[in-house]
């Protein structure tokens, strides 16, 4: 079974760098302003705003959390709480291909850990890490909600069901 490496919640890179400031480019700021018109309160626009942040920069940095908190008049803790709750938001830069392997019960008993460990070994990465070339990030996720087609691997926004080590290897060969 894969070794788990929990994040240190007190690591310095989890806090905004006071010398760095992020801001939406003008065209993205216009899009954000339009999104705000669709919601009754600024807080209600938090999830779509985080999607915009991730689309803009590829991940949600601590500086982006601070920026969103200022835009929406929320505490940074509130914004970070949402970012850290949903695993669809990346708290670190991810590779071009984000490989998310479900290891919940149905997938686990269908050999998902074999797929997960093979990916890490083949790509020479530790769990949760990105390859040196920036192409692949391998992540274990709790549930992808596709128990009837286990094991499941999500690559970016696409589900690949009824996977096996050999099917994953073949798919990985196509992702270069």
Image (cartoon, helix red, strand yellow):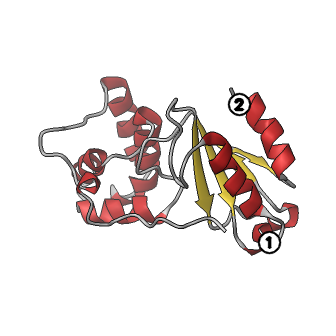
Residue drawn at x 21%, y 50% is: 16
Note whether residue 114 is visible.
yes
For the N terminus, the quadrant is: bottom right
Q: Position of residue 43 (x, y in %)?
A: 35, 59
Disc number for residue 175: 2
Q: Position of residue 100 (x, y in %)?
A: 64, 52
Q: Is residue 55 left or right of residue 32?
A: right
Q: Position of residue 44 (x, y in %)?
A: 41, 59
Viewer-proximal residue among 19 and 157? 19
Label 2 Cα neighbours within 10 Å, binned few <14 / some 14-19 / many ≥20? few
Asked whether residue 37 is in view, the answer is no
Label 2: which secondary element? loop
Task: Say which element carries label 1.
Answer: helix
Location of residue 79 by image quarter = bottom left
Kindly identify the residue that appears in the image at 25 percent across and 34 percent down. Answer: 23
- What residue lies at 41% left-to-right and 58% top-to-bottom? 83
The C terminus: image quadrant: top right
Within-10-Å neighbours for mark 1: few <14, some 14–19, many 20+: some
The residue lying furthest to the left in this view is 19
69 in relation to 27, above or below: below
100 relative to 146 in the view: left or right: left
Residue 85 coordinates in the image, percent (x, y): 46, 66
- The residue at which mark 1 appears reads as 106
Dot 1 or dot 2, earlier in sequence? 1
């Amino acid at each position: 079974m894969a070794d788990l490496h929990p994040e240190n919640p007190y690591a310095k890179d989890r806090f905004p760098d006071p010398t760095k400031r992020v801001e939406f480019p003008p065209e993205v700021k216009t899009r954000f302003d339009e999104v705000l018109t669709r919601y009754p309160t600024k807080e209600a626009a938090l999830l779509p705003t985080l999607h915009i942040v991730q689309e803009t920069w590829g991940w949600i940095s601590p500086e982006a959390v601070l920026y969103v908190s200022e835009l929406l008049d929320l505490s940074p803790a509130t914004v970070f709480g949402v970012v850290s709750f949903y695993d669809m938001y990346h708290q670190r830069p991810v590779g071009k291909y984000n490989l998310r392997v479900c290891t919940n019960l149905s997938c686990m008993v269908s050999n998902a850990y074999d797929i997960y460990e093979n990916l890490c070994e083949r790509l020479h990465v530790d769990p949760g890490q990105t390859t040196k070339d920036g192409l692949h990030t391998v992540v274990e996720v709790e549930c992808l909600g596709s128990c009837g087609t286990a094991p499941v691997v999500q690559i970016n926004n696409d589900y690949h069901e009824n996977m096996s080590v050999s099917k994953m290897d073949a798919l990985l060969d196509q992702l270069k």
